[in-house]
Image: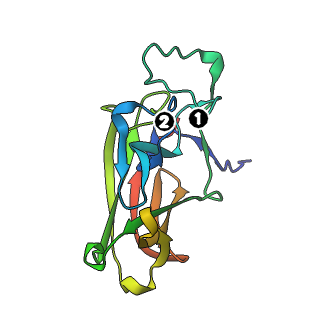
């Protein structure tokens, strides 16, 4: 008699994510990542990582293994993310525009990978590009959402989601606008 074995989840052997610019927080972000966002009138930290899938997850959200003198103890780490076909992950982002001529009719996002046990909170040499997602934007500038910028300036913003759908040894990354898929890209990954 034979029995079927079904694998419903696996543990990632690498981390997958995207970069973004966070609101700068002293003590959390590095001074060299700080820049002034002139459109919105705020200080931001560039090249921060938003991980969709982690090889190993720190148990404390502010554990920064890249900080000078940081010590990572095994007790402070949890097993990597379980990846299941039934659990897509979606994260929201936006791009602000001050003028219509700044709004291009295409959008590109890069998916990054890292094989370090604990992925860094920011873009480092350990984080490598895996693939890019490019989508054409068939959206008129006036249809973008409104955003109040610095000094009462009226801005527009392209609000979108990047979704990761695990599927066996690969993941599909998609850019969604108002729940409509604009583009997608498969990313092959390894599991333990």
Left or right: where 57 falls relative to 135: right
User: Residue 167, image x and y in percent?
Assistant: 53, 57
Pick the front one: 10 or 119: 119
Left or right: where 13 falls relative to 97: right
Query: Disc 2 or 1, which lies upstream in sequence?
Result: 2
User: Residue 9, image x and y in percent?
Assistant: 63, 47
Q: Residue at x 49, y 77 (%)?
A: 145
Q: Which mark is residue 64?
A: none
Q: Is residue 57 visible?
A: yes
User: Residue 152, image x and y in percent?
Assistant: 46, 69
Q: Is residue 76 above or below residue 166?
A: above
Q: Is residue 17 above or below residue 180?
A: above
Q: Residue at x 47, y 50 (%)?
A: 169
Residue 104, quarter of picture: bottom left
Q: Secondary structure at mark 2?
A: loop
Residue 139, quarter of picture: bottom left
User: Residue 125, image x and y in percent?
Assistant: 30, 32
Q: Secondary structure at mark 1?
A: loop
Instruction: Check if mark 2's residue and mark 1's residue have beta carbons within 8 Å.
Output: yes
Pick the front one: 183 or 152: 152
Q: Residues within 10 Å of mark 2 (few under 14, many from 20)?
A: many
Rendered image coloring scheme:
rainbow
Name the residue that disc number 2 marks.
Answer: 13
Q: Is residue 128 above or below residue 117?
A: below
Name the residue that disc number 1 marks.
Answer: 80
Q: Residue lying furthest front in this view?
A: 151
The Cα atoms of the two marked residues, 2 and 1, are separated by 8 Å
Of badges 2 and 1, nearer the viewer stands: 1
Q: Residues within 10 Å of mark 1 (few under 14, many from 20)?
A: many
Q: Is residue 124 above or below residue 50?
A: above
Residue 190, quarter of picture: top left
């Amino acid at each position: 008699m034979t029995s079927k074995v079904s694998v419903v989840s696996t543990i990632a052997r690498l981390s997958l994510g995207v970069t973004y610019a966070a609101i700068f927080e002293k003590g959390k972000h590095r001074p060299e990542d700080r820049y002034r966002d002139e459109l919105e009138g705020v200080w931001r930290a560039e090249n921060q990582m938003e991980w969709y899938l982690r090889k190993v997850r720190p148990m404390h959200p502010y554990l920064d293994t890249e900080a000078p003198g940081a010590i990572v103890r095994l007790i402070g780490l949890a097993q990597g993310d379980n990846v299941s076909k039934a659990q897509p992950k979606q994260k929201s982002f936006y791009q602000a525009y001050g003028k219509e001529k700044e709004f291009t009719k295409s959008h590109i996002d890069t998916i990054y990978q890292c094989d370090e046990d604990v992925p860094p909170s920011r873009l480092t040499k350990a984080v490598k590009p895996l693939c890019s997602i490019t989508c054409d934007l068939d959206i008129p500038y006036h249809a973008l959402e409104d955003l109040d910028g610095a000094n009462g300036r009226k801005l527009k913003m392209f609000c979108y989601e990047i979704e990761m759908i695990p599927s066996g040894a690969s993941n599909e990354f998609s850019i969604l606008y108002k729940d409509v898929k604009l583009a997608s890209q498969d990313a092959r990954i390894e599991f333990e």
